[in-house]
Image: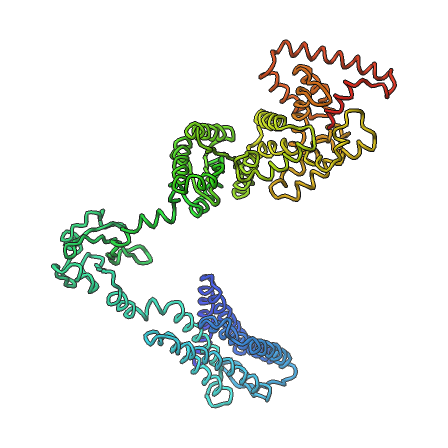
Amino acid sequence: MIESNFWALYVIAALLSAFFLQKAYKRESQIARKLGIAMLMNFLMILFYTLNMVVNYRLIQSMGCSIAFIFLDLMLYFYMEYVISYVGWEFRFPQWLRVTIIAYLVVDSIFMLINPFTQLTLSYRSEVFGDGKILVYEPHLIFYVHMLFNVLQICITIILLFRKCRETPKAYLNRYYGPIGSMVLTMIVYVTYLIGIFPAHMDLTPIMYMLVGLLLYFYNFNYLRSATLSITRNMIFEHLQDPIILFDYEGMLVDHSVYLEKMMPDMVFENGRMTLDEFISAQFFTGLSGTENDQEFDWIYEDNGISRIMECQFSCMKDEVGRLIGKLFVFHDVTTNRQTFFQLENSMLYDSITGFFNKQSFYTQMPQWNDDEYWPVAIVVCNVDGMRAINEAYGTEYGDGVMKQIARYIRRRAGEDAFCAKLDNGDIVVVLERTSDADASDIMDNIRAEILDFYDQMPVSLEYGIAIKDNSASNFEKLLQDARTSMQNKKMLKEKSASSSLVNSLKQTLAESDFQTEEHVERTRRMAARLGKEMGLSDAIIGRLELLAALHDIGKVAIPQDIIKKKGKLTAEERNVIEQHTVKGYRIAKSSPELAEIADGILCHHEKWDGTGYPNALKGEEIPLIARIIACVDSHDVMVNDRPYHKGMPEKDAIAELRRCSGTQFDPKVVEAFTKLLEREDLPVDELKRAAEEHQKEADQEAQKTQQEPRDEISESEIDIRRLLTE
């Protein structure tokens, strides 16, 4: 009968270990997993030890005991690791000691695994147990070392718990006494059994260690919910200054804090006598909507003639199956907070000058626009030109007034639903949901026109850049930077902008080195922008186009003047020198962060669609789009305007020449869009068709004549046309 009880005891211990093993793992925390691993080791230790009771084959019994001892070592190690985390010593526990323990675990495991065959660690004798026999330990020296090692791990664990007790308030010390007591008792049972003092056939320590694990689990995860109920009650009702009152599931008063009596001195609070309905009706809580749901509301009461605002939380407390167990009021005085709330909110959320959101608010709001329900989202970055000059000339107060006025125009045109924020360096970002690039551009153009009209006698204007988010791949911060860069590119082309000094200096240097004039640059810039809009390009690309239009020939500042201004035919050597201006311009642009975005356009603006251009003989769409556009627009402006080496040709002839070079020198799509733009805005359709036919006929005749005449007798007019199309 006793033997069968032993068997049942080990089965129960194994099942309890498995049960708390899965409970620990369900908590999904690192410390719970360590306890779960220890319980797993305990489960396996019991499982292998029971082979000693259910199998009568001596070798299997011996192997079961040896493996059980290995799992005992591992279990104690993970109990120790669990307690290290439990007391917060992950980074304070000596690493050398941990490494030493692990090394011994490996050595001890090897001795235990070979023991059934060598009996170096311990030997066994058989004793009758029930209907069979059981092995009883006969320790050797190595096993005594094993015992000391186990005792050492237990002592380390107990010492860690005692050290934690020194740092713990007295009210919580019971949380550590349980695990310490169970470990001490287990160690005593373990030692007395192994040295033969404890009179039993079976080793009870696996069961004792299972109890240690249960206590560790309980005191870590369940202690605060049960053992500290009275402690927390005193903490809440005696020390919490917020008045609280608790009613049971039937609506009878259970408890309340002393601060509630101070807040309601005319009421008599008697537990078990006052009802919830009586309390509510006596105080007239106008903000309370029924008593069946959790809610928050404000309640105002008079305190010595001063109105106090209380934020009230009403909670319906329920157990784990959803049954009502009580109802709780918590009152919190928010009078001072409410008085300063709006001031703090304004300083934390809004810019004090424009009334727009500030930078932090913008970045907090930014993730919402990753939702496709808002697409397309137009991100507009705008900035007032010459704001520093305005502040210096008229004072910062006037400058603040300018910003306020501009903010009013932006809000009126962008709409109340638009998100507007003030960023660094005077930048304003306007986010327009479900708005295309063209619509956003129209809105900003209207705002800019109103500002120019309002400040017609003052140097106040607005520049902007736009980027569009219409897919999940586009990063919002990158789009914001694109819009800012587009705006900065445009500002660099304005004389009154603080950003324009570099561009103005380069333009002036180029004007002195080449035939280009300010009028040519401005015409090319405007035409490039018009063509970009005609082609449906984004505002960011159009901004780069305008900057490239002004500086695409900047490399000519490094070319000798006698070559640039030569009127006759260039020699091969001179041609090679002048073709280097694209590379030199590329290097100039790359050396400046402000111009880096147009460096590739400068390098490639003399590449040709058929691959015969320079410097890299790129072909087709290998050439950057902005370079293809500038090549076409610049050539058109050169053709229709007077230069020192040729007379400007009629618009109709220039259009015909562009079409003739379509597919060889120029991108056909660019030529198609450009000529349609020119025809629509500048010439009657019939005249253009007739001019195109005449020009094509003349070109064919000229081509035949060229084939028949020597190369050195080419006419000066043809030299001019070729030169203007290549330079």
Query: Measured along the vertical axis of the image, is residue 97 above or below residue 289?
Result: below
**Quadrant where the image shows the C terminus:** top right
Left or right: 652, with 394 as reference point: right
* Residue at the image point whose x is 46% and y is 44% from the top: 423
**Quadrant where the image shows the N terminus:** bottom left
Please say which color scheme the image uses: rainbow
Left or right: 314, with 81 as reference point: left
Image quarter for residue 139?
A: bottom right
Please provide percent x and percent y for residue 26: 45, 61
Please provide percent x and percent y for residue 459: 47, 33
* Residue at the image point whose x is 44% and y is 32% from the top: 458
Query: Measured along the vertical axis of the image, is residue 199 above or below residue 697?
Result: below
Please provide percent x and percent y for residue 407: 40, 36
* Residue at the image point whose x is 74% and y is 36% from the top: 559
Nearer the observer, 295 or 444: 444
Query: Measured along the vertical axis of the image, is residue 53 above or below residue 389?
Result: below
Nearer the observer, 603 or 721: 721
Q: In this view of the protein, can residue 57 be seen by the observer?
A: no
Q: In this view of the protein, can residue 356 be seen by the observer?
A: yes
- Counting the numbered discs, the total is 0
Nearer the observer, 373 or 146: 373
Please provide percent x and percent y for residue 373: 46, 36
Nearer the observer, 658 or 26: 658
